Image (cartoon, rainbow, N blue to C red):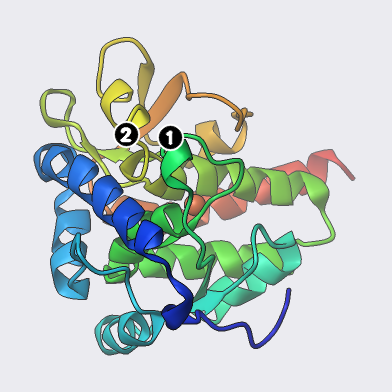
């Protein structure tokens, strides 16, 4: 964690603005068809557009009014204890750099198109924010139990990053890893991958690999199911702790 980092909006180049515009214009018409209502409501509430890289100061003002969440600038992926602690404070870590025009579809670590375009709109949704805070609290509480941290990581992965919502005939996307990916936002809705009903118990026992497109996605019925799964998450944690002595 590097405290006190800022966005430096004046350092964005014309290529950065061009990359944001290309990514936004390429993804948004598709997402208007397939993204969750909560995400589309969030995009409108936070006022993202193709011609403007989001300014974190404005984003934080808007998020503050809507749900009390805010972005904090990080240089890249941060350590788990820092990540969980930020969530308990309703702070979401985000990078400020953008991929290059030559690598629109390949990034080795999340850039701000993922962190901001993908995650921020969902932070305007109270039901989603409550779940994030709960993950943070559990992460802080069990930070010295690697197996529990792994389980919480799976919850985050299969929801915040790769979550779907809605019935089979109208499945929609709310996970940021999908929303920000040209290829996977299309693939995830085909009949090729496995679609399972959301289950905290199942997810917490489901290992994943982060270096390729997923082969399994979990679908919620409603966004409230996330926070409502908290007692189930706690009981999985208790059982695991008992099992591991
Ligand atoms: Fe992410």
The image shows a total of numbered marks equal to 2
- Residue corresponding to mark 2: 182
Relative to 221, 199 lies left or right: right
Relative to 231, 46 lies left or right: left
The circle on residue 105 is 1
Relative to 176, 22 lies left or right: left
Is residue 197 in sight in this rendering? no
**Where residue 88 appears, x then y in whole percent?**
56, 76
**Quadrant in which residue 180 is drawn:** top left
232 up-or-down from 141: above or below: above
Question: Quarter of the image containing the N terminus?
Answer: bottom right
**Quadrant in which residue 85 is drawn:** bottom right
Is residue 220 in sight in this rendering? yes
Q: Is mark 2 within 8 Å of ligand 1?
A: no
Relative to 240, 164 lies left or right: left
**Quadrant in which residue 127 is drawn:** bottom left
For the residue pair 117 and 20, the one nearer the viewer reads as 20
Quick one: label 1, few (<14), some, or many (20+) residues within 10 Å? few
**Where residue 115 appears, x then y in whole percent?**
45, 59
Whether pointer 2 and pointer 1 mark residues with C-beta atoms closer than 8 Å, the reply is: yes
């Amino acid at each position: 964690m590097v405290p006190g980092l800022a966005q430096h909006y004046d350092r964005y180049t014309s290529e950065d603005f061009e990359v944001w515009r290309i990514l936004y214009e390429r993804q948004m018409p598709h997402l208007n068809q397939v993204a969750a209502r909560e995400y589309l409501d969030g995009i409108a509430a936070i006022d993202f557009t193709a011609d403007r890289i989001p300014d974190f100061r404005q984003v934080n003002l808007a998020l503050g009014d809507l749900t009390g969440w805010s972005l904090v600038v990080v240089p890249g992926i941060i350590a788990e204890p820092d990540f969980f602690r930020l969530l308990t404070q309703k702070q979401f870590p985000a990078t400020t750099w953008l991929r290059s025009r030559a690598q629109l579809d390949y990034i080795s670590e999340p850039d701000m198109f993922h962190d901001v375009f993908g995650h921020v709109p969902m932070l305007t949704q109270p039901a989603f924010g409550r779940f994030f805070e709960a993950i943070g609290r559990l992460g802080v509480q069990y930070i010295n139990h690697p197996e529990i941290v792994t389980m919480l990581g799976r919850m985050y992965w299969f929801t915040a990053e790769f979550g779907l919502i809605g019935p089979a005939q109208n499945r929609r996307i709310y996970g940021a890893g999908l929303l920000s990916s040209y290829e996977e936002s299309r693939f995830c809705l085909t009949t090729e991958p496995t679609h399972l009903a959301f289950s905290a118990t199942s997810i917490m026992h489901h290992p994943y690999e982060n270096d390729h497109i997923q082969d399994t996605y979990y679908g919620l019925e409603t966004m409230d199911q996330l926070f409502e799964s908290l007692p189930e998450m706690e009981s999985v944690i208790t059982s695991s702790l008992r099992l591991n002595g």
